[in-house]
Amino acid sequence: MLGAALRLRLRVLRRRLRGQRRRRRSRGGRAAVEDAGREPVLLVSGMGGSVLHARRRSNPKFDLRVWVRILFANLDFKKYLWSLYNADSGYVEPLDDDVEIVVPEDDHGLYAIDILDPSWGPHYLDMVMIFVKATDKAMAGLRTKLETAYKTSRGKKVFSKYVNKWICIACPFQGAPGCINDSLLTGLQFVYGFESFFFVSRWAMHQLLVECPSIYEMLPNLNFNWTEKPTIQVWRKNPEKDGMVELVQYEASDCVSLFEEALRNNELTYNGKKVALPFNMSVFKWATETRRILDNAELPDTVSFYNIYGRAYDTPYDVCYGSESSPIGDLSEVCHTVPAYTYVDGDCTVPIESAMADGFAAKERVGVGADHRGLLSNENVFELLKKWLGASEKAPRCRVSKKPRVVDLGS
């Protein structure tokens, strides 16, 4: 249930939107109403930002939420979500051929995961979904329609025809060096302490991420002019120097060799069978091509672009494995090591330097003092969305910094 203050804000915003629709109707009649219905807001969640269900092709009645869940979270995650990338189809496919992973269609098919289990409490999407309620039918078959339009126009751009505003929140435009480098090597953990026993384990998450195209896409951009290039450091014994301990440094352009060596023996057991999960060069090449396309992308002049990013939180940047007193022997040991980080300013996940470097002619770039998930429930962010989507009669009263300081690693 939403809090009383939030419910009040929603009622006020709904009345404001209804008033706008009535004014359009009085000025232009039915045509104006139809035009208003052609202005939907399409919400695209990030990695892990949608609820996922597992369905069995052999049993139409079987429908189980496998992400995000609490009870039997780790067990069901390993049973249904572990997947392999198919280079021929370009899709990540479950290890069980009878399983299909789908996004549920209720709540317009979108959930914002700002808490571990959205069925246990409010989620930020409730505040934004009021813009979409009357237009969900217009969103049906969007991909098919865009593909048809693309083919019909013989490859001409359709973005400028259907999109006039694009708002990004906490996007890792140039990657998320510390978090993603470590996720590929050791996995990802969302909760710690006692609660971690009720959630997906770091190791189980790691075995999924090794085959996840989004992880490879968010590796630090090799062609970006970083203030300080992100690195991975490993304390190692040098057998050629009588086991002398050395700190070996890998810059972003050198990390592929590290990933390949560290993950060469990585595998999981599924239904009694061993499944190899090395560093996936097919996914890496696919992600590299995606990065090339993004680096050269241009927005039409008719599209207004806005960028919201998080600031004022320590954000992992460089990663270090082992120590001088406890060095790494074989590089595969890295995958079972707790890293040490150096930090820069950001949202705990994405550095400011990456989030600000969208490469577009933004109407506004605004830094908000919140962490990565916290941005989704932040009052200032909501006020900015209302302003930019034309649902606010007054400018937001939030205090934000448009030119936040980026911490220098050398300081």
Image (tube, rainbow, N blue to C red):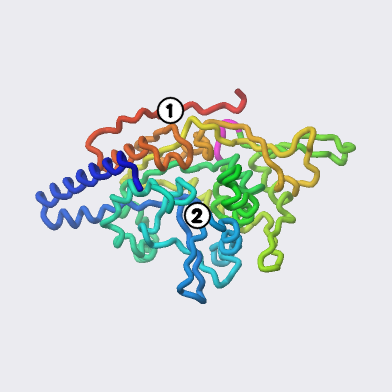
The disc placed on residue 403 is 1
Q: Position of residue 40 (x, y in %)?
A: 29, 53
Which is in the foreground here, disc 2 or disc 1?
Answer: 2
Residue shown at 43% from the left, 53% from the top: 119
Residue shown at 26% from the left, 57% from the top: 134
Q: Is residue 219 magenta?
A: no
- Quadrant of the snapshot with the C terminus: top right
| Three-letter amino acid code of the residue under disc 2 | Val
Cα–Cα gap, marks 2 and 1: 35 Å
Kindly indicate whether the residue at mark 1 contacts the one at mark 2 (C-beta within 8 angstroms): no
Q: In this view of the protein, which residue sits in the foreground, 164 or 77?
A: 77
Residue that extends furthest to the right in the rendered view of this protein: 242
Graded by Cα atoms within 10 Å as few (under 14), some (14 to 19) or many (20 or more), the crowding at tag 1 reads few
Circle count: 2
| Three-letter amino acid code of the residue under disc 1 | Lys
* Magenta segment boundaries in residue numbering: 224-228
Q: Which residue is mark 2?
A: 68
Horizontal relation, residue 70 to residue 361: left or right: right
Q: Position of residue 283 (x, y in %)?
A: 60, 56
